Image: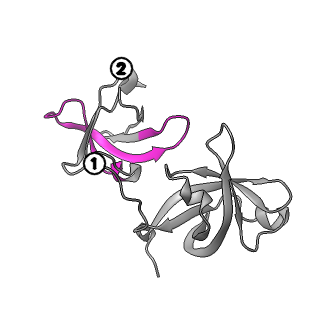
Amino acid sequence: MAESNDWLSVGKIVAVQGLLGELRVNPASDFPERFTVPGPRWLRSRQGGEPSEIQLKKGRQLPGKSLFVVRFEGVDNRSAAETLVGMELLVPADDRPELAEGEFHLLDLVGLKARLTADGPAIGTVSDLISGGNDLLEITTSDGRKLLIPFVEAIVPEVKLKAGWLLLTPPPGLLEL
């Protein structure tokens, strides 16, 4: 049986699109080919458990939106599509595109220590990522508070994956929210 860390979540099925079995996916990946290139993908239900394989037939990005519309083999009508809403779209964890120097996968940020100075103590640890208009880092502080920090270069100017930390330069008041 595969462990949960054997899988990489690339999106969540959020709605049905039309009557012919198409589905809207909110991506958790910066690689559009995850939603447009046909081939095997896996679905995991909201309750968790073992993912099941499904074949992606085709996909496209909705113009002006971050959502993708996908079509899976065997899902040919709205009723069949509705049973998949809420499921997580997965690929094997080792199916990670190669990156250029200085780039990194967003999920690699989870577990990094957050610092306010390069040589200062950690104020917390990146505990989650929230995708939206701008990605947000959820940082859990040593006292258990959860901070939401916009993942933009002005606020997170340095990421040191190998050293295990990232630098925050938050505007006044952001850490007190």
Residue sitting nearer the eye, 40 or 175: 40
- What residue type is disc 1 on? Glu
- Compared with 63, 36 (above or below) is below
**Residue 63 quadrant:** top right
The amino acid beneath tag 2 is Pro
Q: Is residue 52 left or right of residue 119?
A: right
Estimate the spatial distance between the alpha carbons at disc 1 and disc 2, rounded to whole Å.
28 Å
**x, y percent for residue 39:** 59, 71
Q: Give the range drawn in magenta.
A: 108-137
Judging by the rendered image, the residue that carries numbered circle 2 is 171
Residue lying furthest left? 119
* Magenta segment includes 115: yes
Magenta run includes residue 176? no
The answer to whether the residues at label 1 and label 2 have Cβ atoms under 8 Å apart is no
Q: Is residue 90 left or right of residue 63?
A: left
Eye-nearest disc, 1 or 2: 1
Dot 2 alpha-carbon crowd within 10 angstroms: few under 14, some 14 to 19, many 20 or more: few
- Residue 19 falls in image quadrant: bottom right
Q: Where is residue 100 in the image (x, y as percent from the top left)?
A: 32, 50
Instruction: Return the x and y of residue 77 as percentages of the image width and height.
Output: 84, 65
Label 2 sits on a secondary structure element that is loop
Q: In which quarter of the image is the C terminus?
A: top left
User: What's the mark number on residue 101?
Assistant: 1
Residue drawn at (38%, 19%) of the image? 173
Give me the residue at 59% from left, 68% from top: 44
Q: Residue at the location (64% across, 72% down)?
A: 55
Q: Which colour scheme is used?
A: one colour
Q: Which residue lies furthest to the bottom in this view?
A: 1
Quarter residue 120 falls in? top left
How many other residues sit within 10 Å of disc 1, few (<14), some (14-19) or many (≥20)? few
